[in-house]
Amino acid sequence: MNVTKNKFTNPVDKPIKIQIVSRDIPIENTVGNATYILDFIRYLRQAGCEIEYTLLNSSPNGKIPWYILPHNLAALTNVSARNNIRIGRILLRFNSLLEWLFAPLYLAYNFLLPETLKKIYRFARKKQQKASGHAVTSFTWDALATSEEVAFASSIFVKFKPHIVIANYAFLGNVLDSPAIDETVLKVILTHDVRHYRTAHFKKLGVTAFESDWSRETEIIELSKAQVLLAIQEEDAKVFQEMTPQCEVIHMPISAVCHTHNIKQVSGRCLFIGSNADHNLHGLQWFLKNVWSIILQSNPQCSLHVCGTVCDGIEETFPNVRFLGRVENLKTEYSSAQVCLVPLPVGSGLKIKLVEALSHGRACVSTSVGVQGLSNIVDHAVLVADTAEDFAAAVQTLLTHPEKRQRMEEQARKFVTEKLSPQAAYQPFVDRIEQHVQQVAQMMTEKSLNNELSSSISTFNENAKQGEIT
């Protein structure tokens, strides 16, 4: 990361302490929000901050009672997890002896059972649940923080004594109500998206999402608990400012740097990358069932590589399509691709995989949802289409017109260089932190002077009284 200005002019002789409260462990190359927050943390560390990462989820490895923290997160932060003991990079949970007894069975299922058998088991389980008229309910990942979670976060507030507290998503806004946070602490929410917009979009398209039913009113209540809101794209920033005019809203996109490629592009190669999030799966299924066959009619040699855990949700096979699953190093896939696809019919926030594709200098085809917050690159680095026929035509245009595709690749690199450098993305918030620390230092100095003055006046009055008595 090339940063020219990110060190604090710190008025206190110790690092700025930032506490991030989250339900998730961010893992590289898994989901967009993880990539975003890890990138953000790296910049804060380079700015000289000390980071405490408070994990509210007491079961980061599901039913397995231990978890090995990712090396990059452990190197950047100190991680504290609810109901877990940390030894080095290992989190250990001792809630139940049965968890430890059954752990080998869970490991065998996860790592030894073939994926085909796993799919058969999951399908049979869903069918049985449906036949019995009920499904296994689980904790909704975007529910408001529970009293136990708030209590744990508060205990870390007391120990760590942060200058800044950042709630990761609006649904954790209620941790900012903790009495352990005094007036010297800057309260921040890293929003990622507009939750009630997301709820409305999923309902409109009939997409099932295992998330809470967010209303505008509920979101306003949670956002209002913060002093500063970090919005990943400009359209979200405008919405948040209108919803909570008393809050300061800072536009903070994910940063990106341009990548070079030594591998030649494969003729006709398309690429889709995504996690198993509902909107990714829905978008990929729509593309495979409605768009891909049209593309193959015009270009039978065309191929598609699909990367990420989104592959787990696809049970059918399609001609010239390879489902690669999670790929540790995506550079080879981006190098080989001529066109990157973002066929999302629903979603919110910034599409981080689109930003990633642009950073690799790749021309893209997206739905209008996919370019939310990036409208200035439409028709320059991205073609936009919302119907199956138009989407297929846009892909075909890029595959059959190399000059146009190369111009769009150049525009993609230009946009990333000018608009998404780490300093352009994160320095405005770093400047706000510096301003806050200076204001607190000034306030504490004035408070100290006032206390000294009050003490001097009290001493003077006491001496005067004694003089009168004498």
Image (cartoon, rainbow, N blue to C red):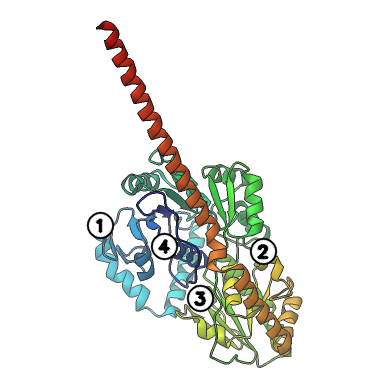
Q: Is residue 143 left or right of residue 267?
A: left
Report crowding for label 4: few under 14, some 14 to 19, many 20 or more residues within 10 A (C-alpha).
some
- Name the spot of residue 314 as percent of width and height, x first: 55, 76
Foreground disc of the pair 4, 3: 4
Identify residue type, mark 2: Gln
- Name the spot of residue 216 as percent of width and height, x first: 62, 46
Lower sequence index among marks 2 and 3? 3
Distance in Å between CA atoms under marks 1 and 4: 32 Å
- State the residue at coordinates (30%, 70%): 105
Q: Which mark is residue 45?
A: 4
Foreground disc of the pair 1, 2: 2
Q: Is residue 36 left or right of residue 72?
A: right
Distance in Å between CA atoms under marks 1 and 2: 44 Å
Find the residue positioned furthest to the top.
469
Instruction: Give above or below for 255 relative to 82.
Output: below
Q: Secondary structure at mark 2?
A: loop
Residue tagged by mark 3? 308
